[in-house]
Amino acid sequence: MSSSTALAASLRDAVAAQRTDSVPATPFRHIPHNIEAEQALLGAILVNNECHDRVSAFLKTEHFFDPLHSQIFETAAKLIAAGKQATPVTLKTFFDNSEPIDAGLTVPMYLGRLAASATSIINARDYGQTIYDLAIRRQLITIGEDIYNTAYDSPVDAPPDSQITEAEGRLFALAENGKFGQGFVGFNDALRTAIEMAGAAYERDGGLSGISSGLRDLDGRMGGLQRSDLIVLAGRPSMGKTALVTNIAYNVANARYESWQQRPELDKDSSEHDGGVVAFFSLEMSAEQLATRILSEQAEVMSEKIRRGMISEQEFKKLVDVSQRLSQIPLYIDQTGGITIAQLAARARKLKRQKGLDVLIVDYLQLLSGSSKSSQANRVQEITEITTGLKALAKELSVPLIALSQLSRQVEQREDKRPQLSDLRESGSIEQDADVVMFVYREEYYIERTKPSEGTAEFQEWMVKMQAVAGKAECIIGKQRHGPVGTCQLGFEGMYTRFFDLAKDQYMPERYE
């Protein structure tokens, strides 16, 4: 070996030794667990089986760190479920043939020690919660390690997006497993909540118990948008369902902005404010397209002119003025296409934590994806999973959730093309899970496409029909759990994609002399 090579080798060894000496030793970390809490809980259950009822709603056998403790808990739970007593004596027969824990300590003897060392049954639920929390932490560590290892060992051609989606799904499933609810609620508590809601409706202008949609007749039918409701808004293409839900989103968010301006002394999150914070999941249209629609509606400049730049200087100034006000309203748009119901739920929860959330809109539910398992089964099962997930999310976040839906083509084959509940596409779960089902119908759209040649008798009849329906729309409430069904008459301006309240005399029956 040459002298230069030897020198280089000695330098590398010196540097390596220096690095080894400078890196502090990593302390050994134990997996989160608490054997004493497990022993205390099992001892309390063996002394008083009622302790099992305090933890059975959320604690499962797999949450125990020690395998023997898991077996003891499972056996005791089965005995209690069968109406028998779970004591060291009754459990003894199930563990007679088990291997001893150590020299001189058999499992039956260990059961006796657990019961003898039980100091208190009062803290049983706290022990159970500690065991559960540590089990969740262990699962989080496992998920984190899997993410770490998969990222290192993943093939070059494997997209990282798939790993992110899988990780989100596992974390969402872990979060869902932790929701064991609050159990029974006394009727007195439920009654108090109902009276408070009625009192708030009585004191509020307009007498609404929910959030106003900004459309008088629709609010009159529904009492506003009710919290925890899944509201399905359906219609055939070109009926204006996206336009209607965009109008509602703007009305709700703008009402909250105006309330902030009028009552600055209140906290922005105060329930005394009108309107609300709106989240709009636009799976079909981009955020820019939605913004253009709202801008066109409020500035009264045709969206087509905005897109093509065919606007005057006066119209441009109007757009700038309106946009400055619109930039202040609490309306948030997520334009990600093809997301899963799990991803949508995670993003909605995050927005509620960070900005607050009062109304959630999904345009439209057929563009959502279920889990890979349901997708592989069939489309009906996937839609069922999606509607069930949306209803659960509405209840969890305590917000009205408006989901748009397509209708089947069988509507077009009927003479009366007003939609019905049976027209909902792909799954009966949409009708079943929804609290409210509404349809948008514009007869003008269909009559306009039957225009005959001008100058004929048919043309005159067609003109009479068009005048009767021009600029009008119907919002048909086909299902409502807590109110009547029926039809609301609305006005519609196609050039601005805007729905509005009709003046009362605009839809009263005509008088014939």
Image (cartoon, rainbow, N blue to C red):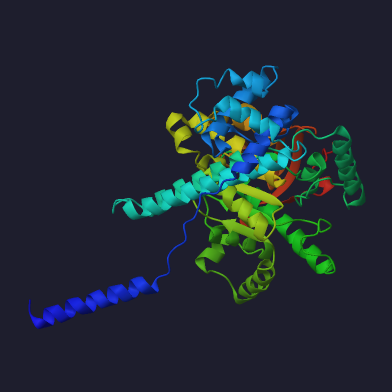
Q: Image height check: is 286 above or below 468?
A: below
Residue at image location 66% in from the left, 57% down from the top: 353
Residue at image location 86% in from the left, 39% down from the top: 194
Q: Image height check: is 47 above or below 257?
A: above
Image quadrant of residue 10? bottom left
| Residue 429 horizontal side relative to residue 168, left or right | right
| Residue 265 horizontal side relative to residue 487, left or right | right
Residue at image location 50% in from the left, 38% down from the top: 370
Q: Position of residue 421 (x, y in %)?
A: 64, 29
Image quadrant of residue 482? top right
Q: Which quadrant would the N terminus be assigned to in this image?
A: bottom left
Camera-side residue of 152 and 283: 152
Q: Image height check: is 257 above or below 119?
A: below
Q: Image height check: is 365 above or below 349?
A: above
Camera-side residue of 415 and 483: 483
Q: Position of residue 276 (x, y in %)?
A: 74, 56
Q: Is residue 443 visible?
A: no
Camera-side residue of 39 and 155: 39
